[in-house]
């Protein structure tokens, strides 16, 4: 039976009664017996796995929620819900009816295509390759959509959600730092273990709940709609973890950790000589040496740390693989026999780690058999939270992920589910990565069209990550002379991958147009565009060359990650993350030396030297503009932003080492990774797109304008805190 996540109200299709039921008792049955947290984002307890991913940043950590208290509170909540539901339903109906009288549309569908690049979109439209987007341009609207500074997905989608500049929503990068100890942390979520524990020998029993706190501030526009009684379905919009609480359903996206508390730690099993077995995952994955005896291979799947044990050892699941023939084998794991075929992914496999006694940690993963001849190679995706038995809330209400899984089977739940790093490290080839990316895309489509069928009135917003991930990894094939091309891939074989992806997204737009009625407004948008990433800029090396940063005596080059080798008593500025430089301020940083009176001059000095910084090896300008944060942001959280924001030129981006706080020898270096396209440049150079089935004022439109526009379409006035404006034409404004 499929639990019913949607309330019975007139904004929804009546669900199939055979699929309804379960409710809070179903949730309670899925809760584990104890609650605990592990893999906290404190650097001292964080291994390489949590930081060396293509989207750089410490892992969110994993909190396994449950306990008898949770079961009891779930029951009490269900009783309160049942008693108060009729009153709340009447009140919501009255509020929504007032809004609908002013509404310009009965329903709004926002189709997010992450990273769709306007120059490619427009070229392909003109060539006739994107007929559905071209039809929207002709009959409705099309324009370029201004992005955020910097144009990073967590920053841009947070501005989309709140209608505000980053100074009001507090997200400035994937990564932030604790100024007191210079340690990195994830910018959007904090996971803290419970403070009270009972220790009995080697056993550690948690007595208080862990805390998962979202760090994005301001109010998403779907919460504003909910306050007026209007229902929303929000699917995989980035920076929605932990899930928002509002009138509607939501499946969280970017920053949902995998089961190990990281942004995506794959496992690669091999017997080849020369492969190095790792302990805790290097650059995105574990390489684990297997034991082979003839046609049988034995190894183990590494899971999260066991917080119920004093030493917190990794949880493990043993498995074996037996060869069937030249092209197939059988995986024996968790009392299951999973068929393996060469170079074909399995379906999602449900696995269970045992922590202690009856405490179980469920997850899902997929396997890919790469070789089983004279050598053995098996790839396993990052182990993800099981949507049927989630160890922490990944949806609102919690049963919504259960509903989706019962509807369509298990699906990817990690915020960054496409395994870009496995391709960069050549544990996957291009074809295997594409298959994985499109399988995740297909899962998203099924959820999206289910919401379109169910939600007849209100808002549906769904973001598809495929364009972003595919362009990151395949841009080298459309950029002649890209340094990565010589090291990664055959341009002839994959030169059409990006064009084919755009055609596939256009087909999705067409099918969406066919699934909606005339009372529905469709908005198709991207949060930013895309450009080549050919050369990296090591900001810390630049700061060191000019005497603003000093390393400890004898520190290697490149220095250690996360600023560990910085001599703070002599350092005035340092770089961490994808787009920022921080001053080492007195009374803010733990060992700051820059006085308040020095700030204006130092910022002017740094911005002046960095703006138009030229790469001597190529003769090109590497930094389009370096900007003081006061010129970019406004709002209560500006002080959390980097002191200087770097807007790179096309072809350049911060170097891989500098992102994680290393300091290399050279300022400039070739980017030879498969990750060959990016958007971390000056926002003026990488706008997104906006298209729709009705006329809108797209001239000068920005991503912060989407929230006020959706509110206006549904009859709600823009809240005063929003920076954006409605894009409705003058004759439609109320």
Image (tube, rainbow, N blue to C red):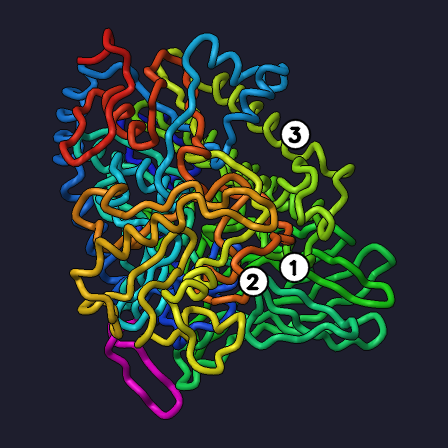
Which residues, given as a range, are shown in magenta?
193-208
At x 52%, y 36%, the residue is 530
Closest to the observer, 593 or 641? 593
Task: Tell me the element at label 3.
Answer: helix
Q: Secondary structure at mark 2?
A: loop
Q: CA distance from mark 2 to mark 1?
A: 9 Å
On whether residue 198 falls in the magenta region, the answer is yes
State if disc 1 and disc 2 touch (CB < 8 Å). yes
Q: Earlier in the sequence, mark 3 or mark 1?
A: 1
Residue 3: x, y in percent? 39, 44
Label 3 Cα crowd, 10 Å radius (few <14 / some 14-19 / many 20+): few
Name the N-terminal-most of marks 2 and 3. Answer: 2
Is residue 531 rendered to the left or right of residue 64? right
Which residue is found at the position 17% from the left and 13% from the top? 734
Choose between 21 and 140: the one closer to the eye.
140
Viewer-nearest residue: 731 or 614: 614
> Distance between the Cα atoms at labels 2 and 3?
28 Å
Write down the quadrant of residue 152 in the picture: top left
Could you say which disc has been placed on residue 284 in the image? 2
Q: Quadrant of the N terminus?
A: top left
């Amino acid at each position: 039976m499929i639990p019913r996540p949607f309330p019975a109200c007139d904004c929804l299709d009546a669900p199939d009664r055979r699929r309804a039921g379960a409710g809070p008792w179903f949730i309670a049955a899925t809760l584990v017996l104890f609650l605990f947290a592990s893999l906290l984002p404190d650097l001292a307890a964080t291994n390489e796995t949590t930081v060396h991913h293509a989207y750089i940043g410490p892992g969110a950590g994993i909190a396994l929620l449950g306990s008898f208290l949770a079961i009891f509170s779930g029951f009490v909540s269900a009783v309160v819900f049942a008693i108060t539901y009729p009153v709340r339903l009447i009140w919501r109906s009255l509020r929504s009816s007032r809004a609908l009288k002013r509404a310009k549309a009965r329903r709004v569908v926002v189709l997010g295509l992450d990273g769709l690049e306007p120059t490619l979109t427009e070229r392909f439209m003109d060539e006739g390759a994107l007929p559905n987007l071209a039809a929207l341009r002709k009959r409705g609207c099309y324009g370029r959509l201004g992005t955020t500074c910097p144009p990073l997905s967590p920053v841009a989608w947070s501005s989309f959600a709140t209608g505000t500049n980053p100074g009001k929503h507090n997200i400035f990068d994937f990564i932030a730092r604790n100024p007191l100890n210079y340690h990195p942390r994830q910018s959007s979520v904090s996971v803290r273990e419970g403070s009270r524990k009972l220790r009995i020998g080697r056993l550690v029993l948690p007595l208080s709940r862990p805390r998962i706190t979202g760090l994005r501030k301001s109010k998403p526009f779907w919460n504003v709609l909910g306050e007026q009684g209007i229902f929303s379905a929000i699917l995989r919009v980035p920076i929605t973890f932990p899930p928002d609480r509002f009138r509607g359903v939501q499946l969280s996206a970017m920053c949902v950790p995998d089961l190990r508390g990281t942004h995506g730690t794959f496992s690669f099993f091999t017997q080849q000589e020369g492969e190095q077995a790792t302990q805790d995952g290097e650059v995105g994955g574990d390489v684990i040496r297997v034991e082979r005896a003839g046609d049988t291979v034995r190894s183990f799947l590494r899971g999260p740390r066991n917080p119920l044990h004093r030493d917190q050892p990794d949880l493990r699941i043993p498995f074996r693989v037996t060869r069937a023939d030249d092209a197939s084998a059988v995986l024996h794991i968790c009392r299951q026999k999973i068929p393996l075929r060469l170079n074909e992914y399995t379906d999602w496999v449900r696995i269970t780690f045992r922590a202690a006694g009856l405490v179980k940690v469920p997850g899902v993963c997929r396997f890919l058999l790469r070789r089983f001849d004279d050598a053995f190679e098996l790839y396993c995706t990052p182990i993800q939270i099981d949507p049927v038995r989630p160890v922490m809330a990944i949806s609102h209400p919690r049963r919504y992920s259960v509903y989706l899984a019962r509807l369509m089977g298990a699906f990817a739940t990690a915020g960054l589910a496409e395994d870009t790093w496995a391709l960069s490290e050549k544990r996957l080839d291009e074809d295997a990565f594409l298959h994985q990316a499109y399988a995740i895309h297909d899962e998203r489509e099924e959820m999206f069209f289910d919401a379109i069928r169910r939600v007849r009135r209100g808002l549906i917003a769904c973001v598809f990550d495929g364009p972003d991930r595919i362009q990151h990894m395949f841009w080298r094939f459309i950029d002649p002379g890209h340094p990565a091309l010589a090291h990664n891939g055959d341009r002839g074989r994959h030169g059409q991958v990006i064009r084919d992806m755009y055609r596939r997204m256009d087909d999705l737009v067409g099918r969406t147009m066919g699934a909606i009625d005339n009372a529905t407004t469709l908005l198709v948008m991207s949060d930013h565009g895309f450009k080549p990433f050919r050369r990296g800029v090591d900001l810390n090396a630049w700061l060191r060359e000019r005497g603003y940063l000093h390393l400890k005596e004898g520190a290697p080059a490149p220095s250690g990650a996360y600023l560990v080798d910085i001599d703070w008593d002599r350092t005035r500025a340092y770089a961490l993350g994808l787009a920022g430089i921080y001053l080492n301020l007195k009374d803010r940083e733990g060992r700051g030396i820059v006085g308040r009176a020095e700030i204006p001059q130092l910022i002017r000095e740094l911005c002046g030297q960095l703006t138009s910084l030229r790469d001597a090896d190529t003769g090109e300008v590497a930094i389009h503009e370096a900007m003081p944060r006061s010129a970019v942001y406004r709002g209560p959280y500006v002080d959390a932003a980097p002191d200087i924001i770097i807007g790179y030129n096309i072809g350049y981006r911060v170097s891989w080492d500098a992102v994680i706080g290393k300091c290399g020898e050279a300022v400039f270096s070739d980017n030879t990774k498969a990750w060959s396209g990016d958007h971390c440049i000056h926002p003026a150079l990488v706008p997104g797109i906006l298209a729709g089935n009705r006329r809108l004022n797209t001239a000068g439109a920005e991503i912060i304008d989407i929230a006020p526009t959706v509110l206006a379409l549904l009859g709600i006035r823009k809240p005063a805190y929003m920076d954006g404006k409605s894009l409705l034409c003058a004759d439609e404004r109320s």
